[in-house]
Amino acid sequence: MTDSELIALYQARDPRAVEETRAQYGAWCAAIARRRLTDSRDVEECLNDCALAVWNAIPPAEPKHFRGWLGAIVRHRALGLV
């Protein structure tokens, strides 16, 4: 699934958007979170917080570079949990 298709799912408020995001980017997001967080429970909490943040942000946000935008959200959330 392309990033544009993912964004369209979020805009349609389709719960598959979260599932697809985790399938495509979950391991990458976890790796970003693990750079700051050592406890696996904190990593999982960070990823759940990020899923909710993305769900609440789109719409109205319409990121042009979804992967980079998502990575920034994960980094900021992980820093907030340190």
Image (spheres, grey):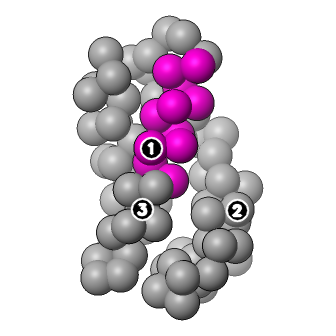
Residue range of the region highlighted in magenta in the rendering = 41-51
Res. 2 visible in picture: no
Amino acid at circle 3: Val
Amino acid at circle 1: Asp
Left or right of 2? Residue 36 is left
Q: Residue 6's x, y, as percent?
A: 58, 77
The CA span between labels 1 and 2 is 14 Å
Q: Residue 45's x, y, as percent?
A: 51, 31
| Label 3 vs 2, first from the N-terminus | 2
Foreground: disc 1 or disc 2: 1
Secondary structure at badge 2 equals helix
Secondary structure at badge 3 equals helix
Residue 50 among magenta residues: yes
Q: Residue 80's x, y, as percent?
A: 26, 28
Left or right of 47? Residue 54 is left
Q: Quadrant of residue 74?
A: top left
Residue at the location (60% across, 17% down)?
40
**Magenta span main SS:** helix
| Label 1 vs 2, first from the N-terminus | 2
| Number of the label disc, if any, that sits on residue 49 | 1
Q: Residues within 10 Å of mark 2 (few under 14, many from 20)?
A: some
Mark 2 highlights which residue? Answer: 19
The CA span between labels 1 and 3 is 9 Å
73 versus 61 height, above or below? above
Amino acid at circle 2: Glu
The CA span between labels 3 and 2 is 12 Å
Residue at the location (29% across, 77% down)?
61
Secondary structure at badge 1 equals helix
Residue 5 among magenta residues: no
